[in-house]
Amino acid sequence: MTAAVILTETYTGSHKTNTLPLLLQELHPYFQEKILITDEPSLYLPFVKNQARILVPFYKEADPLSSLHTSLSLAVSKEVLLLHESNGFSGIHTFKEIKKAKEYFQTQGVLYQEDSKTSLTNSLFDKSVLSVLQKQLSVNNKDTADFLRQINYVFVHEQKKKSL
């Protein structure tokens, strides 16, 4: 089972929480476990209600690694798909492609790469990376590239739509 983990940002002024209910509704048919990671749980509670668990990162100012660590530590599921509230869900086909790559290559993680940008958004990791994350974050190392050098992962590149 995979948990959908939604990362948030602290916003000044108006908050983009109006998209969160739609995102949770979109994820509902595909993910039994949904987790929201935020530094401001009281802001999100009215929008989340009982649709997801709200967690606060263990390590402050170490995102996205801290959010990954928190979600893997507390998820019931064996793996997590990291999403971002402002990017939404890429769709079930993208998730299935990522999941298939993880199983085929037998990796600890799959990073979804869009437009030659690498981020942890739309990436899938299993709990086997927790010890690496714990060790790295305990010495205040927030370097995502350093984390990736220590685990077994593959890239899945965004499929370009073919024009007619």
Image: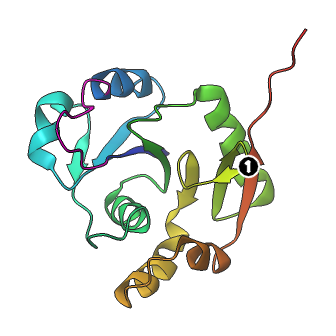
Q: Is residue 55 above or below residue 1?
A: below
Residue appearing at x 58%, y 27% in the figure = 91
Residue 58's x, y, as percent? 25, 70
Q: Give the mark count.
A: 1
The question of residue 114 being in magenta is answered with no
**Residue at point 35%, 40% (across, down):** 34
Residue 44 image-quadrant placement:
top left
Where does the image place residue 62, in percent across and percent down from the top left? 36, 70
Specify few, some or many for label 1: CA neighbours under 10 Å numbering under 14, 14-19, or 20 or more. few
Residue 142, picture quadrant: bottom left
Work out whether residue 118 or residue 150 is closer to the camera in this orientation and state it. Answer: 118
- Residue at point 36%, 54% (across, down): 76
Q: Which sits in the foreground, 98 or 23?
A: 23
State the image quarter where residue 65 is shown.
Answer: bottom left
**What amino acid is at disc 1?**
Ser
Placement of the C terminus among the 4 image quadrants: top right
In the shown orientation, is residue 52 left or right of residue 100? left
Q: Residue furthest right?
A: 164
In-image side of 96 versus 59 (left or right): right
Q: Residue furthest top?
A: 164
Main SS, magenta residues? loop
Q: Nearer the viewer, residue 43 or 154?
A: 43
Residue extent of the magenta highlight: 9-19
Residue drawn at the location 87% of the way across and 19% of the way down = 162
Give the percent coordinates (x, y) of residue 32: 39, 35
- Nearer the observer, 140 or 27: 140
Q: Which residue is mark 1?
A: 116
